[in-house]
Amino acid sequence: MKLSETKKDTHGKVMGIEGDAHFVSRVTAIGMTEGVPFQTVRNNKRMPVLVYLRETLIALNRSDAERIEVESE
Amino acid sequence: MKTRIALLGQPNSGKSTVYNALTGSRQHVGNWPGKTVEKNEGHYTYDGVKYTVTDLPGSYGLTGNSDEEVITADYIKSGNADLVCILADASQLERSMYMTAEFAPLQKPAVLLLNMMDVAKAQQKEIDYELLSQRLGIPVLPFTAAESKGYGELKKLLAQELAQPHIISSAPDVKEKHYDDSMADSVKDDSGAKYEWIGKMLDGVTSSAQKEYRLSAFDRIATAPFWGKLLSIGIILLAFLVAMVICIPFMSIGSMLPSLLGKPIADTLGAWNVHPWLVSIFSLIIPNVLYFSLSMAAFVLGVNIVFGFLEEIGFLARAAYQFDGVLSKLGLQGKAICPMLMGFGCTIGGTCGTRVMDNWGQRMLAMAVVWAVPCGSIWSIIPVISGMFFTPAETLLVSLGILVYMIIMMWLVSKVFGRFLSPKESRTGMIMELPPYHKAHWGHILKESFLKAFDIFKRALSTVTIVSLLFWVFSFSTTGNVQDSLLYQVGTFIEPVTRFFGMGWQTFMGFLSSAFAKEAVLGVLNAIFVGQNSLVEATFHAGNTATDGAVLSQMMSQTVSKPEALAFMAACTFNIPCVMALTTTYRESHSFKWTARVALFYIGMALLLSCAVYHISALFM
């Protein structure tokens, strides 16, 4: 499933990142790499998704969150 | 002897705090050659040796292709720095070590600063920095940038390392040194390798067990879709009020200067038989320049204190998260909401509030957009002028119209300037961290704010003097009659043209004076229509410039038609902001070219708007 479809308090793992090198470099530099465990903290319509990973609370805008493939536990 | 130090770190790592604390007021701001990225360089002296510090642009990595990353990587590779001081956030060590992982393959001398040790301690995180230092092969210094006590040790360490440098002894196993757009898979693999390396370096250094994250009660509201926005707007407006409270004492002292100093100066010079023109220049302009510069500095002080506070405790990131969706349509980051709301109070406040933006292009664009927000002075003169011609209900409609056009103007500005200042390809969706709430370090906030305010005061003196002289030349008349001023001569000469734009020479002069100070408009109209004060006194707040609304209203409505009044109000509201805001924009952007471009656009658009309003409303009135 996509990160943008996860519900609040979902725990899971990032499985895939889809996009060009520029996009991949931006999301991985902030810590979102394939295989990293995460927790969805907030996911409201028309708002960036809030995820917690590597001890950091990160806001990721919706259209980018649609390009992150995740697996929930 | 090696003395060049560069600071490297991710956003929120406290890099600029370290830079400001090391260099104080000995700073120089410029641009990187050929780029719209700010270059900050400063220096400090330690043990009789002068050291140069370069604050490298903030970015999350070194291998991406944003301007910031390319500049930083090139600067380090070319050996411009003798020592790189890397900053990492001790409270989020694993993630913030990414910059170190990006830097390691470059094989340059470095030290690592583990900043925010106070936050890490509060979270009960223990860090074995000696073990980390052993593994990396470079010194690792635990640090709290916002406290002044650690800087002696930092300067000592930097001096030592410049003399006997160390290079990171291990590096992540990466395939590529640079990536182009087609290499997404290599980026993925290499990023993975970098975090693997970080994991190895941090093994046993700190515990990073992924725990359940719970939003604090405050954050549950601050991040909620509706209430969060309301809370953000409320807090920013409150911050503006506090900023006003801080600057009011300075401003009221400043506002007394024209009447306090004007007469003594005039009397003294008069007694020395100085030419009356010079007397007028000195007695009107000097106190006024002091007043303006002091007001500007006071605003900068107030806004820097409250924004410094909101930024340091971590609230600004929440506001940015709330408004990113709306503002991205204007090509702006969510953080721009703060200067925009501040703009309703004062454009100077809004302009220097853009300090929260991440890069120069965003900053300049935010300033250009903030200019469209009608400031408090406009909201105080529009009802008065409108009230002379229209009923209260119609005045309300005028105000509504102003708000609607404000949004149109913001959109226009972002369309026209956005593609240069925030190019489409560099516009990226929000990816940012919401830092944990910190305690504010007041000493550091106050010191930085006072330095900034004093700097603006010094610089404003010269700019405001030049502009004031220009206005003086145009509005001065030997007899005190409006008819003898250059402004009148020019105004009546070009009246056929200004008529086309909807304004007669009188209202056009009011329009011109609105570029000097919005609150001067009423005084200038009074000088023109009632003629009690000279134009120059009205413009420079001298003498008794109190306006009798009833008399002015009677005189004005005889000469000015309703469509002209509407056109005039529109033109004044969306004209360039006052001289002080203009100067602040120039000072904050360091770009005369861009300030002038935006100013010309505003003047042109104000005239076009006035023209349209006049000719359309003339059809109905």
Image (spheres, rainbow, N blue to C red):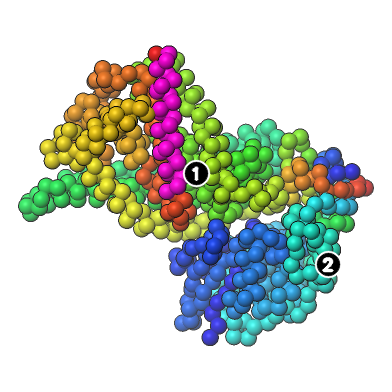
The span picked out in magenta is B596-620
Under mark 2, the amino acid is Ala
Quadrant of the frame with the C terminus of chain B: top left
Q: For the residues marked 1 and 2, what is the alpha-carbon distance in whole angstroms?
A: 43 Å
Name the foreground residue: B383 vs B608.
B608
Q: Is residue B192 visible?
A: no
Picture quarter containing residue B190? bottom right
* Of marks 1 and 2, the one in the foreground: 1
Q: Name the residue: 54% across, 45% down.
A: B417
The label number, if any, that marks residue B193 in the structure image: 2
Whether marks 1 and 2 lie on the same chain = yes
Residue B50 coordinates in the image, percent (x, y): 48, 78
- Image side of residue B273 versus residue B468, left or right: left
Q: Is residue B424 rendered magenta in the image?
A: no
Within 10 Å of disc 1 (Cα), the crowding (few <14, some 14-19, many 20+) is many
Q: Are marks 1 and 2 in contact (CB under 8 Å)?
A: no
Q: What chain letter is assigned to the residue under label 1?
A: B
Q: Determine the secondary structure under disc 2.
A: helix
Position above or below: B290 against B617? below
Q: What chain letter is assigned to the residue under label 2?
A: B
Q: Name the residue: 32% across, 30% down.
A: B498
Name the foreground residue: B129 vs B613.
B613
Picture quarter containing residue B207? bottom right
- Image side of residue B423 versus residue A23, left or right: left
Q: Is residue B377 visible?
A: yes
Q: Name the residue: 87% across, 48% down.
A: A69
Tell me the residue that label 1 is attached to.
B368
Q: Determine the secondary structure under disc 1.
A: helix
Name the foreground residue: B368 vs B399.
B368
Position above or below: B5 against B312? below
Between discs 1 and 2, the one toward the N terminus: 2
Under mark 1, the amino acid is Ala
